[in-house]
Image (cartoon, rainbow, N blue to C red):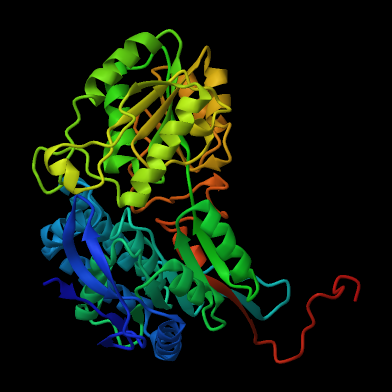
Amino acid sequence: MSEKFQNYINGQWVDTKSGRTFEDRNPARWDEVVGTFPKSSKEDVDEAVKAARAAFKTWRLVPAPKRGDIVRKAADLLVARKEEIARLMTREMGKVLLETRGDVQEGIDTGYYAATEGRRLFGMNAPSELPNKMNLSFRVPIGVVGVVTPWNFPMAIPTWKIFPALVSGNTVVFKPASDTPATATMLVKILEEAGLPTGVINIVHGGGGEVGNAIVEHTDVDALSFTGSTVVGKKLSEVGSRTLKRISLELGGKNAQIVMDDANLDLALDAVLWGAFGTTGQRCTATSRLILHEKIHDMFMKMLINRASKLRLGDGLLPDVEVGPCINEGQRERVHSYVEIGRQEGAKLVLGGEAATGGDLDLGWFYKPTIFDGVTPAMRIAVEEIFGPVLSVLTVKSFEEAVDVLNGTSYGLSSSIFTQDVNRAFRAMRDIEAGITYINGATIGAEAHMPFGGVKQTGNGHREGGWTVFDFYTEWKTVYVDFSGKLQKAQIDTYNQ
């Protein structure tokens, strides 16, 4: 019998008001139920927001370094339970243990980094234009923050959002993806054990249409941080704007890796295999496009097809597996629908293009690593996010054409170029339209202390990670201290008096 989980509201583990539940299943072995979770409603969200609002009154007054101490303790607990969490995450969302361990490590790194920022929430002061007067500015928390996260990084992304929000002095209502609720529950239990006061963190499980919408529509939620699809992000932005919420959107990508004719081809090959098929291509930073210079196209394609055809698929808990399943049946069907679109558009299918079956693969939602050659920039498989193990290869004649092709989508998250020409590398840094650019590296792999996010329809300008995320979770307050003993009037013409 599977474990039964609950929501966490106002310091208590509770069932939903309705009593409804849903199952969390292993995508590699679909008959395995990881757990049963509450299918919450607006009523449950209301209770969580009420608890968070009440807790904010006292949590905001806790000194930021002390708030950081609690987050640091949570990071210590993540270290102690890293393997346990990684194995749970692999069962829950499918990616291999090497990657789920890395997912937990990202949460650990974020925890230690965010904890230290409790001592670095610097303000900025400036001289006054008037005598015997001082001008100060400092950061204050926003209030109640809604956090809505995806399933592909069920520890890293929630910690990116929640840890800085807490250190900044906000309280949180957290809705994790319905495909990965167990990992999210583990994070909240760790925060509870670390000593977070009652009501500061609340988790409400359920679907985006019911729970997610209830959070963004709630008049007592002051800010929302969301990672997911561009389509959903636009809807949340529209709804949230009605109550003037501050909203951070980290959305889709159609990331490309350029390989120039002077590149180290072995290095570029390792990178594209990792970028395109790591996490089964289910990353917002996944290498979805490969842009090859025509001079190395034929040689590189032979190398690529040879290596990609040997990738081992299976249950991510097994030590020799390199590629896990799609997250669920619907996602595998979506991937295959794009393969059919690529065929219809005239792209040349050179590898894969079908579900991976046989033996234990029949137990889950596996799809063969798939490569299309002869892709042109206007094809749908070259501009639309697929979120699966499908790589589109485009051929160019020059560096300038490569950059134009890379920039030719509505997205701008991550990018990569392989070249040994330092001048090309610096031109790429300048000219590529993306929030992240790698020189001689894969398009995937963020570091916790650096800004993460994109341009164009990849988001709305905010950044996760690093020092920049604290700009989202805090507001500026300006204070004027006049010790002149008389009323001094600013914003009038004092120069001609």
Please say whether residue 139 is visible from this viewpoint. Answer: no
Q: Quadrant of residue 15?
A: bottom left
Q: Is residue 214 left or right of residue 355?
A: right
Please say whether residue 163 is visible from this viewpoint. Answer: yes
Residue at left offset 18%, top offset 64%: 33
Q: Quadrant of the N terminus?
A: bottom left
Q: Is residue 375 left or right of residue 444?
A: right
In depth, the one of 160 and 228 nearer the eye is 228
Q: Quadrant of the C terminus?
A: bottom right
> Can you give x and y, in whole percent of width and height, for residue 389 in the image?
33, 36
> Can you give x and y, in whole percent of width and height, for residue 371 in the image?
36, 26
Q: Is residue 495 left or right of residue 12?
A: right
Residue at left offset 17%, top offset 58%: 31
In depth, the one of 258 and 452 nearer the eye is 258
Q: Residue furthest right?
A: 496
Task: Tell how many labels.
Answer: 0
Q: Residue furthest left?
A: 319
Residue at left offset 19%, top offset 49%: 28
Residue at left offset 66%, top offset 80%: 133
Residue 122 to residue 422: above or below: below
Residue 137 to residue 248: above or below: below
Residue 349 to residue 287: above or below: above
> Can you give x and y, in whole percent of width and height, for residue 198 in the image?
31, 88
